[in-house]
Structures are given as structure tokens and as C-alpha cells.
């Protein structure tokens, strides 16, 4: 594998007229797919403590070259947290960087002061603890910084990790759940590197802020085109689009079909059979692919929009256990519009080169919406622009009940509980939002576009729950 670069280094090189060095880019020997460590909590008085160190680090992406990164108790990304509904937890983040950071639990239903937004800054050298009782059904969430004006920079350097939540219902299902064996976390990202590969190159132009800062190196759990040696059985992949602003159109290179079993914030009611899966930034999808009859096969997880490979799957091992995907998965709350007490509109647009929601740029001192505790509401989100956006709401989940004016347009695989919804140019969605159980009149939650360059350029608003 030889990997080039089209980031700022390459742009400078082109501006200089190219030439100079003719050294080919460094090689990449494919690694085994890294599996983030499953961190063991320490029990203190019935509270599970997870100690997480936010560090500067160095990580080997290219053979023999160390790249400067940020990471959480690792060299790139962070460990996976496995939580059970009802657990009392304390996520203790210590900031060993030389700048402020925050750490947000994306998809977590927690009190506003535990949400890790720009309002819960972790000063240099300090520890901040997100303490709460896990209060939601099984799903795949993640944690990442939400630092004021720094979120895309911090995520780009490697700050992100997975949170897996299980509950009694999910445990009772015959799903692959052996972490790292048949239940595989897969963090999908793309990056630019500097020419010498010793740093991640975060330097978007104005055009890239608008259209997406899509790197030329695609990485999976922090490795370039790694290889996963699979057992010949059902394998569950927990896919996270952990990129800054790339929409991924995923499929297997051999056209193999798979079943999506979970969306952002829950399992689906029933598996959805598919061959391609579109994930926008921040979205998660749990899929199960049945490799029982594929011994010896080798294929890739491909990204069709940019024509890139994320990883190779070799079916090289015998099954050490058998699972059989059930026909029904989660029981979700029925969609009951008679509960709706309010409708709010969110228009995604742009004014004077700044992204806006309802004509307003993000202001940390302004509360945009005040929502009554426990309310069920309809939030209508409209992409006024020609370019792609998505919409993420903190603290709770929603159902997509209409897309472009019709319930029939809602995709089968977006019918679970979600917390990010993708809107192509000029699209609109109607969301049924069940507000969180935690009131706090002073500390707001966020809603925003999860294309991080857009979020960072003011496409974000704040709401309190009272
Ligand atoms: Cu994934 Cu406001 O965040
Ligand atoms: Cu979030
Ligand atoms: Cu956007």
C-alpha cells in the first residue's frame, strides 16, 4: 500500500510548483484490525469508575513513522466502555493536554451538567467526572470532545471512543456479543497527514469547511486498511462514522448482503437486509453479516463515495460459538402523535459565510429553546441549502416520522431511536422527540449539525429542559 496526501502540505507543495523531493510516500503493511481495549471499571461504593487519561501521544500509522496524536489512555482513539442500563458510573477524564478540552457522551441520556459540552471545560491538569445512572436501552454510543471552537481539531487528533450499552433485553437475544471476536467495534475515519507523516494535518480551506474536509487516508480503529480475521459465523460490526465531515456509502466488495440490527440509539424492531449503508458523521449502525458459509473468503469493507477501502475481512477461523439472528429485536415505544404538545422548526442555512440554525449563529450565552421536562414534541428540521448537513440532538433520542413530507420516505434502517439524522441538500425531516428526564434551567444541551466543520462554524444551538 502506498498512501499519498492532498492536505495543506500537498497544497503548499503544488503552489511552489511541485518538484524537489521525489521520495515516494511511505509504505503501510496492513495491520490486524486494532480492537480498542475494553476498560475495566473500578467499583467504589456501588459506582463503576472509569479512569480515562486524555494524553498527547504518538501512533504508528505508516511503517516505522510515529505520528503525533491525542488519545485517551492509548496512542490513538480511546478504550471502549461497556455499560449496562441501570449502572451507576463515573467517567473520570483527566486532561493531560496543554490546552482545555471537554468530553461529551454522544447519545447518552444524562443531566445537562454531565453532558460534557463546551460548558463543562476540563482545565489543564484537572479531572472532570461525568457521574450518572445509565438510563437507556441497549445501543452503541461514543465519547468525543466538544470543546468550544476546538471540537473538530480535537477529534481529528484522535480523541474519540465507543460506549456500548447493554440491557436485559439485548442480553437475552441470540446476537454476537463476544467483544473483539464476533462483536467488533469499528471506528471509521479519514485523515490528511503532513508530508513527512509525523502529524495529522488539520487545515481546512474555506471550501473544505463548506464541502467537507475529507482526508485521502482512510483509517479503521486507527489503522490504515487493516485486516480482520473473522470466524466463519455471524459477525456483528458496530460501525461508527467518526469522521469530521465525510458521508460514507459502505458495502462489502463482494456485494455480500448484511442485516442492520441497530441504529444510533437502539436496536431496530427487526433486522433490515441491505447491501449498502450510508452513514453521516456521528451516526452509528450495528450490522450482522453471516459468514457461516464463507470459509476462506476474503473481501473488503468498501467506501463507494470516495472509492476507498476501510478494511479487509478474511474468513480464516472456525466458529467457536454459533449465534442465530432473531427475527425481532427491540420493542420500541409506539409512535403516538396524540402526545405531542409542541412543534418547533429548525432551518439549517447560512448568512454572511457563517452557518446558522434559524438564522442564528451559535452563541454560548444564548438559550435558543426552552423545553418542558418530559415533553413529546415534533421538531421539523429543514436543510435550506444545496449541500449536505445532518442534525444531532443531545440528551435524548428521536424517531424520524417523515422525510421530505412523507412517512413513506423514512428509510427502513432509520426507524429505530436515533440521535443524528442525515439531510441531503434541500431535504427536510420531521422528528418525534421525547424530551429527557433531567431538568436544569441554567445548563443547556446542544443541537447541531454533526459535520464538525459546520458545528465549529456556528451551526449549533442550545436548549434547556425545565
Ligand atoms: Cu457527537 Cu454535540 O455531539
Ligand atoms: Cu452528542
Ligand atoms: Cu452541516
Image (tube, rainbow, N blue to C red):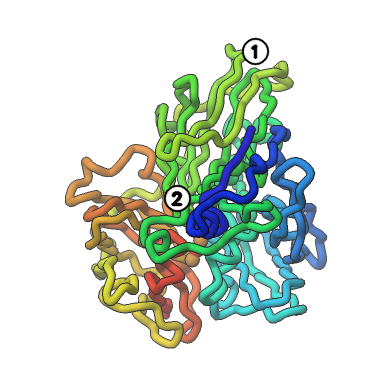
Report x, y in % for residue 234: 59, 24
Q: Quadrant of ligand 3?
A: bottom left
Q: Nearer the viewer, residue 280 or 244?
A: 244
Q: Circles 2 and 1: CB distance less than 8 Å?
A: no
Of mark 2 and mark 1, the one earlier in the sequence is: 2
Q: Which residue is mark 2?
A: 246
Report x, y in % for residue 221: 65, 44
Q: Which residue is mark 1?
A: 296
Q: Nearer the viewer, residue 230 or 327?
A: 230
Q: Nearer the viewer, residue 333 or 184?
A: 184
**Residue pictured at 44% horizontal, 64% vertical:** 205
Query: Which quarter shows the C terminus?
Result: bottom left
Query: Which quarter shows the N terminus?
Result: top right
Furthest residue toward left: 405
Report x, y in % for residue 375: 35, 69
Name the quadrant containing residue 305. Answer: top left
Q: Nearer the viewer, residue 152 or 43?
A: 152
Q: Is residue 256 above or below residue 225?
A: above
Amino acid at each position: 500500500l502506498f498512501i499519498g496526501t492532498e492536505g495543506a502540505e500537498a497544497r503548499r507543495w503544488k503552489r511552489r510548483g511541485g518538484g524537489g523531493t521525489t521520495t515516494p510516500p511511505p509504505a503501510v503493511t496492513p495491520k490486524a484490525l486494532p480492537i480498542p481495549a475494553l476498560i475495566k471499571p473500578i467499583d467504589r461504593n456501588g459506582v463503576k469508575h472509569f479512569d480515562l487519561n486524555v494524553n498527547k501521544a504518538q501512533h504508528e500509522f505508516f511503517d516505522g513513522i510515529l505520528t503525533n496524536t491525542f488519545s485517551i489512555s492509548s496512542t490513538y482513539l480511546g478504550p471502549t466502555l461497556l455499560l449496562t442500563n441501570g449502572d451507576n458510573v463515573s467517567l473520570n477524564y483527566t486532561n493531560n493536554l496543554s490546552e482545555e478540552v471537554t468530553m461529551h457522551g454522544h447519545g447518552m441520556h444524562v443531566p445537562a451538567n454531565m453532558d460534557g459540552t463546551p460548558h463543562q471545560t476540563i482545565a489543564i491538569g484537572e479531572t472532570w467526572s461525568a457521574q450518572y445512572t445509565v438510563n437507556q436501552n441497549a445501543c452503541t454510543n461514543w465519547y468525543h470532545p466538544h470543546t468550544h471552537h476546538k471540537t473538530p481539531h480535537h477529534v481529528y487528533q484522535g480523541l474519540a471512543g465507543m460506549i456500548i450499552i447493554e440491557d436485559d433485553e439485548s442480553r437475552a437475544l441470540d446476537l454476537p456479543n463476544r467483544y473483539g471476536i464476533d462483536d467488533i467495534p469499528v471506528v471509521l475515519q479519514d485523515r490528511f497527514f503532513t508530508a513527512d507523516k509525523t502529524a495529522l494535518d488539520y487545515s481546512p480551506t474555506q471550501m473544505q469547511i463548506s464541502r467537507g474536509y475529507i482526508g485521502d487516508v482512510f483509517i479503521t480503529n486507527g489503522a490504515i486498511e487493516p485486516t480482520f480475521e473473522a470466524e466463519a459465523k455471524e459477525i456483528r460490526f458496530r460501525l461508527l462514522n467518526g469522521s469530521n465531515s465525510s458521508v460514507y456509502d459502505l458495502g462489502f466488495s463482494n456485494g455480500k448482503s448484511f442485516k442492520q440490527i441497530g441504529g444510533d440509539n437502539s436496536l431496530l424492531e427487526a433486522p433490515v437486509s441491505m447491501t449498502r449503508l450510508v452513514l453521516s458523521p456521528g451516526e452509528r449502525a450495528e450490522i450482522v453479516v453471516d459468514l457461516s458459509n464463507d470459509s476462506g473468503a476474503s473481501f473488503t469493507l468498501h467506501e463507494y463515495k470516495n472509492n476507498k477501502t476501510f478494511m479487509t475481512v478474511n474468513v480464516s477461523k472456525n466458529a467457536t460459538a454459533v449465534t442465530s439472528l432473531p427475527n425481532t429485536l427491540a420493542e420500541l415505544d409506539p409512535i403516538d402523535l396524540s402526545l405531542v404538545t409542541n412543534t418547533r422548526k429548525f432551518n439549517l442555512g447560512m448568512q454572511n459565510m457563517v452557518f446558522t440554525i434559524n438564522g442564528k449563529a451559535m452563541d454560548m450565552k444564548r438559550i435558543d429553546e426552552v423545553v418542558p421536562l418530559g415533553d413529546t414534541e415534533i421538531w421539523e428540521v429543514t436543510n435550506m441549502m444545496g449541500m449536505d448537513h445532518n442534525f444531532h440532538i443531545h440528551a435524548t433520542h428521536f424517531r424520524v416520522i417523515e422525510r421530505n413530507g412523507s412517512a413513506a420516505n423514512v428509510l427502513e434502517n432509520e426507524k429505530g431511536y436515533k440521535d443524528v439524522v442525515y439531510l441531503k441538500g434541500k431535504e427536510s425531516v420531521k422528528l418525534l422527540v421525547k424530551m429527557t428526564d433531567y431538568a436544569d434551567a441554567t445548563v443547556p444541551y446542544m443541537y447541531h449539525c454533526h459535520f464538525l466543520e459546520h458545528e465549529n462554524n456556528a451551526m449549533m444551538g442550545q436548549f434547556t429542559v425545565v
